[in-house]
Image (spheres, rainbow, N blue to C red):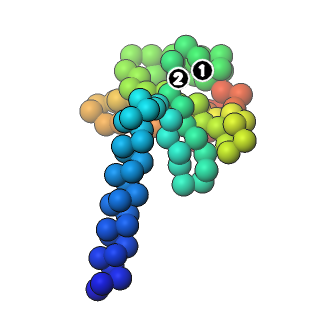
């Protein structure tokens, strides 16, 4: 039981440290578990193919946030668009060229 508490405490400290760092730096970058980095971008900065797909398939659906996803070397590996449809957030994924990934 002491080990479980120790892990819970360490996880809390880690989360608090990351949150504090992001808040202090006004950061819009998110580091995922697989070392990918998400950077918030404008919808208009998506590749043409992604923008076209988004505008034709989800024409009247509000876009909540758009991310550029990069690997640990900084190479763009794709894009993620979070839309809000019927009160539910849904993530639409695109590859680096803007092709929809199912």
SS for tag 2?
Answer: strand
Kindly report which numbered mark, 1 or 2, lies closer to the viewer in this rendering: 2
For residue 52, what is the image quadrant?
Answer: top right
Judged left or right of residue 77, residue 34 is left
Residue 93 image point, x, y percent: 56, 36
**Residue placed at 71% from the left, 28% from the top?**
97
Question: Outermost residue, bottom direction?
Answer: 1
For residue 4, what is the image quadrant?
Answer: bottom left
SS for tag 1?
Answer: loop
**Residue placed at 54% from the left, 31% from the top?**
39
**Residue placed at 42% from the left, 38% from the top?**
22
Q: Is residue 55 above or below residue 37?
A: above
Decide if residue 80 is in sight here.
no
Viewer-nearest residue: 50 or 78: 78
Q: Which residue in the protein does label 2 denote?
A: 41
- The total number of labels drawn is 2
**The N terminus lies in which quarter of the figure?**
bottom left
Task: Sort mark 1 into few (<14), some (14-19) or many (20+) by Cα contacts within 10 Å.
Answer: many
Cα–Cα span, label 1 and label 2: 8 Å
Residue 54 image point, x, y percent: 53, 22
Decide if residue 20 is in sight here.
yes
Task: Sort mark 2 into few (<14), some (14-19) or many (20+) by Cα contacts within 10 Å.
Answer: some
**The C terminus lies in which quarter of the figure?**
top right
**Residue placed at 54% from the left, 37% from the top?**
38
Q: Is residue 12 above or below residue 39?
A: below
Judged left or right of residue 11, residue 5 is left
Q: Is residue 9 above or below residue 32?
A: below
| Upstream in sequence: badge 1 or badge 2 | 2
Residue 8 image point, x, y percent: 32, 70
Q: Which residue in the protein does label 1 denote?
A: 46
Q: Are marks 1 and 2 in contact (CB under 8 Å)?
A: yes
């Amino acid at each position: 039981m002491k080990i479980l508490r120790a892990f819970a405490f360490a996880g809390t400290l880690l989360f608090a440290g990351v949150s504090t760092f992001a808040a202090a730096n006004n950061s819009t970058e998110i580091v995922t578990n697989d070392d990918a980095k998400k950077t918030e971008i404008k919808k208009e900065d998506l590749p043409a193919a992604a923008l076209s797909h988004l505008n034709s398939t989800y024409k009247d659906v509000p876009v909540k946030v758009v991310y550029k996803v990069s690997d640990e070397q900084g190479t763009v590996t794709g894009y993620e668009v979070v839309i809000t449809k019927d009160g539910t957030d849904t993530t639409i994924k695109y590859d680096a060229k803007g092709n929809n990934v199912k």
